[in-house]
Amino acid sequence: MSNLDTAKAMIAAYNAQDVDTYVSYMTDDACEANYRGAVVREGKEGTRSGLAAAFAKWPQNKAEIVEASQIGAYVLMREHVTRGPASDGSELVDPFDVIAVYSFEGDKCSRVEFIR
């Protein structure tokens, strides 16, 4: 499977809110971070628990792949994210676009950075 296929599989798992499958595509020390900024989810376990909390808050959360390309060990995807109503009654989040940069070590994703 190519890195592009892996990143697309990660989004499919994300949309199914299947955190175990999502993190199975990651290295043990992988992280998710804001582009050139703070790490928001650290390691497989941090990613698993962070996504589980987000999915509990936004049970209709989805990311649509608008564009995707692979450049060497990187995959770039423009994603359109919709959250839907929050389970805690907080204010509705408007849909938004994000550029996600997936970095790979071998066949596993080691980092995802979000540009928003």
Image: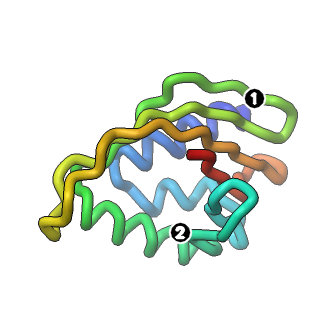
Contact between marks 2 and 1 (CB within 8 A): the answer is: no
At 30% across and 43% down in the image, what residue appears? Answer: 94
At 69% across and 54% down in the image, what residue appears? Answer: 35
At 63% across and 74% down in the image, what residue appears? Answer: 42
Identify the amino acid type marked 2. Thr
**Dot 1, how many residues are within 10 Å of its Cα: few (below 14), some (14-19), or many (20+)?**
some
Q: Which numbered disc flags the more N-terminal residue, 2 or 1?
A: 2
- Residue 71 percent coordinates (x, y): 82, 30
- Mark 1 = which residue? 70
Q: Judge whether residue 110 can be spotted in this image.
A: no
Query: In front: 27, or 50?
Result: 50
- Residue 60 percent coordinates (x, y): 23, 48
Q: CA distance from mark 2 to mark 1?
A: 23 Å
Mark 2 lies on a secondary structure that is: helix
- Mark 2 = which residue? 47
Identify the amino acid type marked 1. Gln
Q: Quadrant of the N terminus?
A: top right
Q: What mark, if any, has residue 49 been given in the picture?
A: none
Q: Judge whether residue 21 can be spotted in this image.
A: yes
Q: How is the image coloured?
A: rainbow
At 35% across and 64% down in the image, what residue appears? Answer: 54
Query: In front: 30, or 88?
Result: 88
Query: In front: 109, or 116?
Result: 116
In the image, is residue 77 above or below residue 22?
A: above
In the image, is residue 59 above or below residue 82?
A: below
- Compared across the picture, whether 14 is left or right of 23 comes to left
- Residue 15 percent coordinates (x, y): 37, 44
